[in-house]
Protein backbone atom coordinates (compact mmCIF):
# COMPACT_ATOMS: atom_id res chain seq x y z
CA UNK A 1 0.00 0.00 0.00
CA UNK A 2 1.20 3.50 -0.86
CA UNK A 3 0.40 6.76 0.96
CA UNK A 4 1.07 9.83 -1.23
CA UNK A 5 2.08 13.18 0.26
CA UNK A 6 2.30 15.65 -2.60
CA UNK A 7 2.35 18.81 -0.46
CA UNK A 8 5.25 20.11 1.60
CA UNK A 9 5.17 19.14 5.24
CA UNK A 10 3.78 21.80 7.55
CA UNK A 11 4.97 22.71 11.02
CA UNK A 12 3.69 20.57 13.86
CA UNK A 13 2.99 16.87 14.30
CA UNK A 14 1.45 15.15 11.26
CA UNK A 15 0.46 11.49 11.50
CA UNK A 16 1.22 9.60 8.28
CA UNK A 17 0.37 6.08 9.50
CA UNK A 18 -1.97 5.35 12.41
CA UNK A 19 -2.64 2.21 14.46
CA UNK A 20 -6.30 3.20 14.44
CA UNK A 21 -8.30 2.41 11.32
CA UNK A 22 -7.43 0.47 8.17
CA UNK A 23 -3.69 0.31 8.90
CA UNK A 24 -4.02 -1.06 12.43
CA UNK A 25 -2.09 -4.17 11.35
CA UNK A 26 1.07 -2.04 11.06
CA UNK A 27 1.03 -1.90 14.90
CA UNK A 28 2.63 1.55 15.05
CA UNK A 29 2.08 5.24 14.49
CA UNK A 30 4.43 7.03 12.11
CA UNK A 31 4.55 10.82 11.93
CA UNK A 32 6.47 13.81 10.60
CA UNK A 33 7.34 16.56 13.04
CA UNK A 34 8.23 20.08 11.89
CA UNK A 35 9.45 22.67 14.42
CA UNK A 36 10.11 26.33 13.63
CA UNK A 37 13.26 28.02 14.88
CA UNK A 38 13.02 28.51 18.64
CA UNK A 39 9.91 26.35 18.81
CA UNK A 40 9.34 23.47 21.19
CA UNK A 41 7.17 20.36 20.95
CA UNK A 42 6.31 17.96 23.76
CA UNK A 43 5.35 14.29 23.48
CA UNK A 44 3.38 12.93 26.46
CA UNK A 45 4.04 9.52 27.96
CA UNK A 46 2.03 6.49 26.86
CA UNK A 47 4.00 4.57 24.19
CA UNK A 48 7.48 3.48 23.31
CA UNK A 49 8.71 6.16 20.90
CA UNK A 50 11.67 6.77 18.61
CA UNK A 51 12.56 10.29 17.42
CA UNK A 52 14.82 10.42 14.36
CA UNK A 53 16.36 13.77 13.43
CA UNK A 54 16.07 14.40 9.70
CA UNK A 55 17.33 17.99 9.59
CA UNK A 56 18.16 20.77 12.03
CA UNK A 57 19.83 21.61 15.32
CA UNK A 58 17.74 20.45 18.27
CA UNK A 59 17.82 19.66 21.96
CA UNK A 60 16.01 16.58 23.25
CA UNK A 61 14.87 16.60 26.88
CA UNK A 62 13.21 13.63 28.58
CA UNK A 63 12.08 12.46 31.98
CA UNK A 64 11.70 8.80 32.89
CA UNK A 65 11.12 7.46 36.40
CA UNK A 66 11.88 10.85 37.86
CA UNK A 67 15.24 11.23 36.09
CA UNK A 68 15.63 14.14 33.68
CA UNK A 69 18.20 14.10 30.89
CA UNK A 70 18.97 15.96 27.68
CA UNK A 71 21.07 15.63 24.54
CA UNK A 72 21.65 17.67 21.41
CA UNK A 73 21.52 16.55 17.82
CA UNK A 74 22.57 18.31 14.63
CA UNK A 75 22.07 17.18 11.05
CA UNK A 76 22.45 19.11 7.80
CA UNK A 77 20.71 16.60 5.54
CA UNK A 78 19.55 13.00 5.22
CA UNK A 79 21.99 11.88 2.56
CA UNK A 80 25.43 12.89 3.84
CA UNK A 81 25.17 12.39 7.59
CA UNK A 82 24.05 9.67 9.98
CA UNK A 83 21.02 10.36 12.20
CA UNK A 84 20.64 11.12 15.89
CA UNK A 85 17.81 9.04 17.38
CA UNK A 86 16.18 9.08 20.81
CA UNK A 87 14.35 5.91 21.90
CA UNK A 88 12.27 6.07 25.09
CA UNK A 89 9.95 3.76 27.06
CA UNK A 90 6.24 4.33 27.55
CA UNK A 91 6.58 6.31 30.80
CA UNK A 92 8.84 9.02 29.36
CA UNK A 93 7.78 12.56 28.51
CA UNK A 94 9.89 14.06 25.74
CA UNK A 95 10.42 17.64 24.57
CA UNK A 96 12.21 18.68 21.39
CA UNK A 97 13.37 22.27 20.90
CA UNK A 98 14.76 23.73 17.70
CA UNK A 99 17.89 25.71 18.59
CA UNK A 100 18.57 27.36 15.23
CA UNK A 101 16.62 27.25 11.98
CA UNK A 102 13.70 24.96 11.27
CA UNK A 103 13.91 21.30 12.28
CA UNK A 104 12.41 18.12 10.86
CA UNK A 105 12.01 14.81 12.66
CA UNK A 106 10.23 11.50 12.19
CA UNK A 107 8.45 9.97 15.17
CA UNK A 108 7.58 6.29 15.57
CA UNK A 109 5.32 5.07 18.40
CA UNK A 110 4.13 1.63 19.43
CA UNK A 111 2.89 -0.27 22.45
CA UNK A 112 5.53 -1.80 24.71
CA UNK A 113 4.86 -2.77 28.34
CA UNK A 114 8.58 -3.40 28.99
CA UNK A 115 10.45 -0.65 30.79
CA UNK A 116 13.92 0.18 29.47
CA UNK A 117 16.41 2.95 30.09
CA UNK A 118 15.99 5.75 27.52
CA UNK A 119 18.75 5.66 24.91
CA UNK A 120 20.11 8.47 22.76
CA UNK A 121 21.91 7.10 19.70
CA UNK A 122 24.56 9.43 18.28
CA UNK A 123 25.51 9.50 14.57
CA UNK A 124 28.76 7.75 15.49
CA UNK A 125 26.82 4.80 16.94
CA UNK A 126 24.79 4.25 13.78
CA UNK A 127 26.03 1.13 11.99
CA UNK A 128 26.63 2.05 8.36
CA UNK A 129 27.61 -0.47 5.70
CA UNK A 130 27.90 -0.63 1.94
CA UNK A 131 25.83 -3.59 0.83
CA UNK A 132 25.84 -5.24 -2.55
CA UNK A 133 29.44 -4.24 -3.23
CA UNK A 134 31.31 -6.70 -5.44
CA UNK A 135 28.16 -8.40 -6.72
CA UNK A 136 25.59 -7.94 -9.52
CA UNK A 137 27.95 -5.71 -11.53
CA UNK A 138 27.52 -3.10 -8.76
CA UNK A 139 23.88 -2.55 -9.76
CA UNK A 140 22.69 -2.96 -6.17
CA UNK A 141 25.41 -1.17 -4.22
CA UNK A 142 23.82 0.98 -1.53
CA UNK A 143 24.39 2.38 1.96
CA UNK A 144 22.44 0.79 4.82
CA UNK A 145 22.38 2.50 8.21
CA UNK A 146 21.01 0.56 11.17
CA UNK A 147 20.36 2.64 14.30
CA UNK A 148 19.01 -0.11 16.52
CA UNK A 149 17.67 -3.63 16.15
CA UNK A 150 17.46 -6.81 18.20
CA UNK A 151 21.25 -7.00 18.52
CA UNK A 152 21.67 -3.74 20.46
CA UNK A 153 18.12 -3.01 21.68
CA UNK A 154 16.42 -6.33 22.61
CA UNK A 155 14.02 -4.40 24.87
CA UNK A 156 12.55 -2.36 22.04
CA UNK A 157 9.54 -3.31 19.91
CA UNK A 158 10.99 -1.38 16.96
CA UNK A 159 13.84 -1.67 14.46
CA UNK A 160 14.95 1.64 12.93
CA UNK A 161 17.32 2.36 10.05
CA UNK A 162 17.89 4.20 6.77
CA UNK A 163 18.94 3.30 3.23
CA UNK A 164 20.65 5.53 0.67
CA UNK A 165 19.90 4.16 -2.78
CA UNK A 166 22.46 5.35 -5.32
CA UNK A 167 21.00 6.88 -8.51
CA UNK A 168 20.04 4.20 -11.01
CA UNK A 169 20.67 1.31 -8.61
CA UNK A 170 18.60 -1.17 -6.62
CA UNK A 171 18.21 -1.63 -2.89
CA UNK A 172 16.35 -4.05 -0.62
CA UNK A 173 17.71 -6.55 -3.11
CA UNK A 174 17.63 -9.48 -3.76
CA UNK A 175 13.87 -9.51 -3.09
CA UNK A 176 13.20 -10.55 0.50
CA UNK A 177 10.37 -10.73 2.99
CA UNK A 178 9.60 -11.22 6.67
CA UNK A 179 6.55 -11.69 8.86
CA UNK A 180 6.88 -8.37 10.71
CA UNK A 181 5.16 -5.23 9.34
CA UNK A 182 7.48 -2.56 7.94
CA UNK A 183 7.17 1.08 6.88
CA UNK A 184 9.29 2.73 4.16
CA UNK A 185 9.27 6.53 3.91
CA UNK A 186 11.03 8.26 1.00
CA UNK A 187 12.93 11.48 0.33
CA UNK A 188 14.59 12.25 -3.01
CA UNK A 189 17.64 14.26 -4.08
CA UNK A 190 16.88 16.38 -6.06
CA UNK A 191 13.32 16.58 -4.71
CA UNK A 192 11.65 16.02 -8.10
CA UNK A 193 13.24 12.58 -8.28
CA UNK A 194 11.44 9.27 -8.23
CA UNK A 195 11.91 5.56 -7.83
CA UNK A 196 9.97 2.33 -8.07
CA UNK A 197 8.98 0.21 -5.09
CA UNK A 198 7.73 -3.28 -5.84
CA UNK A 199 5.57 -4.63 -3.02
CA UNK A 200 4.68 -8.25 -3.65
CA UNK A 201 4.06 -8.15 -7.40
CA UNK A 202 2.70 -4.59 -7.50
CA UNK A 203 4.92 -1.66 -8.58
CA UNK A 204 4.53 1.80 -7.02
CA UNK A 205 5.86 5.06 -8.47
CA UNK A 206 7.39 6.66 -5.37
CA UNK A 207 8.29 10.33 -5.03
CA UNK A 208 9.49 12.69 -2.31
CA UNK A 209 7.56 12.28 1.00
CA UNK A 210 5.73 9.09 -0.05
CA UNK A 211 5.20 6.25 2.41
CA UNK A 212 4.82 2.55 1.63
CA UNK A 213 3.38 -0.11 3.94
CA UNK A 214 4.83 -3.62 3.72
CA UNK A 215 2.80 -6.45 5.17
CA UNK A 216 3.40 -10.09 6.10
CA UNK A 217 5.33 -12.03 3.50
CA UNK A 218 5.53 -9.34 0.80
CA UNK A 219 8.80 -9.00 -1.11
CA UNK A 220 9.90 -5.36 -1.38
CA UNK A 221 12.78 -4.55 -3.77
CA UNK A 222 13.35 -0.88 -4.72
CA UNK A 223 15.12 1.03 -7.49
CA UNK A 224 16.08 4.71 -7.86
CA UNK A 225 15.75 6.49 -11.19
CA UNK A 226 19.06 7.48 -12.82
CA UNK A 227 20.14 10.93 -11.67
CA UNK A 228 18.25 10.77 -8.38
CA UNK A 229 19.43 9.55 -4.99
CA UNK A 230 16.69 7.91 -2.93
CA UNK A 231 16.70 7.93 0.88
CA UNK A 232 14.21 5.91 2.81
CA UNK A 233 13.58 5.41 6.48
CA UNK A 234 12.68 1.83 7.39
CA UNK A 235 10.86 0.91 10.57
CA UNK A 236 10.00 -2.68 11.49
CA UNK A 237 7.63 -3.59 14.31
CA UNK A 238 8.59 -6.78 16.17
CA UNK A 239 5.79 -9.30 16.68
CA UNK A 240 5.10 -10.91 20.02
CA UNK A 241 6.94 -14.22 20.03
CA UNK A 242 8.42 -13.50 16.58
CA UNK A 243 11.02 -10.76 16.68
CA UNK A 244 12.69 -9.58 13.49
CA UNK A 245 16.29 -10.68 13.06
CA UNK A 246 16.99 -11.42 9.39
CA UNK A 247 14.93 -11.34 6.19
CA UNK A 248 14.19 -14.37 4.05
CA UNK A 249 15.49 -13.98 0.49
CA UNK A 250 13.23 -15.22 -2.28
CA UNK A 251 14.86 -18.47 -3.37
CA UNK A 252 14.70 -17.86 -7.11
CA UNK A 253 16.87 -14.72 -6.76
CA UNK A 254 19.34 -15.73 -4.05
CA UNK A 255 22.01 -16.65 -6.62
CA UNK A 256 22.73 -13.02 -7.56
CA UNK A 257 24.47 -12.46 -4.19
CA UNK A 258 27.33 -14.77 -5.16
CA UNK A 259 30.34 -12.64 -6.20
CA UNK A 260 31.22 -15.38 -8.71
CA UNK A 261 27.76 -15.44 -10.29
CA UNK A 262 27.86 -15.04 -14.07
CA UNK A 263 25.74 -11.98 -14.84
CA UNK A 264 25.38 -10.69 -18.36
CA UNK A 265 27.11 -7.37 -19.02
CA UNK A 266 26.47 -5.11 -22.00
CA UNK A 267 29.13 -4.77 -24.70
CA UNK A 268 28.75 -2.46 -27.71
CA UNK A 269 27.69 -4.35 -30.81
CA UNK A 270 30.45 -5.68 -33.01
CA UNK A 271 33.22 -5.68 -30.42
CA UNK A 272 34.65 -8.48 -28.34
CA UNK A 273 36.15 -6.38 -25.57
CA UNK A 274 33.51 -3.72 -25.06
CA UNK A 275 35.85 -0.99 -26.39
CA UNK A 276 34.59 1.46 -28.98
CA UNK A 277 36.05 1.00 -32.49
Image (spheres, rainbow, N blue to C red):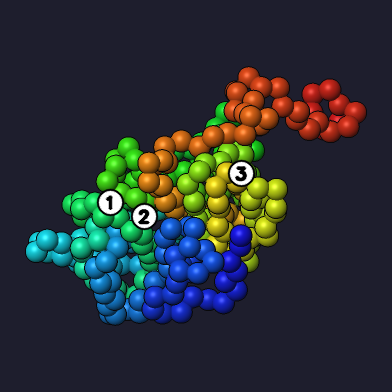
156 versus 6 height, above or below: above
Classify residue 71 as left or right of residue 229: left
Q: CA distance from mark 1 to mark 3?
A: 29 Å
Tell me which numbered mark, 1 or 2, is placed earlier along the sequence.
Answer: 2
Circles 1, 2 touching at the beta carbon (< 8 Å)? yes
Q: CA distance from mark 1 to mark 2?
A: 8 Å
Residue at image position (24%, 57%) is 89
Q: CA distance from mark 2 to mark 3?
A: 26 Å
Query: Does the image show residue 223?
Result: no
Q: Residues within 10 Å of mark 3 (few under 14, many from 20)?
A: many
Tell me which numbered mark, 2 or 3, is placed earlier along the sequence.
Answer: 2
Look at discs 2 and 3 and give the one toward the viewer: 3
Q: Nearer the viewer, residue 13 or 34?
A: 13
Residue indicated by mark 3: 219
Q: Which quarter of the image is occupied by the C terminus?
A: top right
Where is residue 200 shown, x and y percent of the image?
A: 65, 47
Query: Which residue is the extreme one toward the top?
Result: 260
Residue at image position (15%, 65%) is 63
Residue indicated by mark 1: 121
- Residue 83 numbered tag: 2
Amino acid sequence: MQIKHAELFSKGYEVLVSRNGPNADMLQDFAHLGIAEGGKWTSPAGDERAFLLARGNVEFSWNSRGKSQSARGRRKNLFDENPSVLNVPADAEVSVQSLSGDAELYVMATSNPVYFTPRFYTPQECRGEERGKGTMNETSTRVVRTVFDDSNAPWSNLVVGEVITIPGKWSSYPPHHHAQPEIYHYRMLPEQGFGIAVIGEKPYFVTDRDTVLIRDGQDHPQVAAPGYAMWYLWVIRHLEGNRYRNPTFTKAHEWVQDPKAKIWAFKPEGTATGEQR
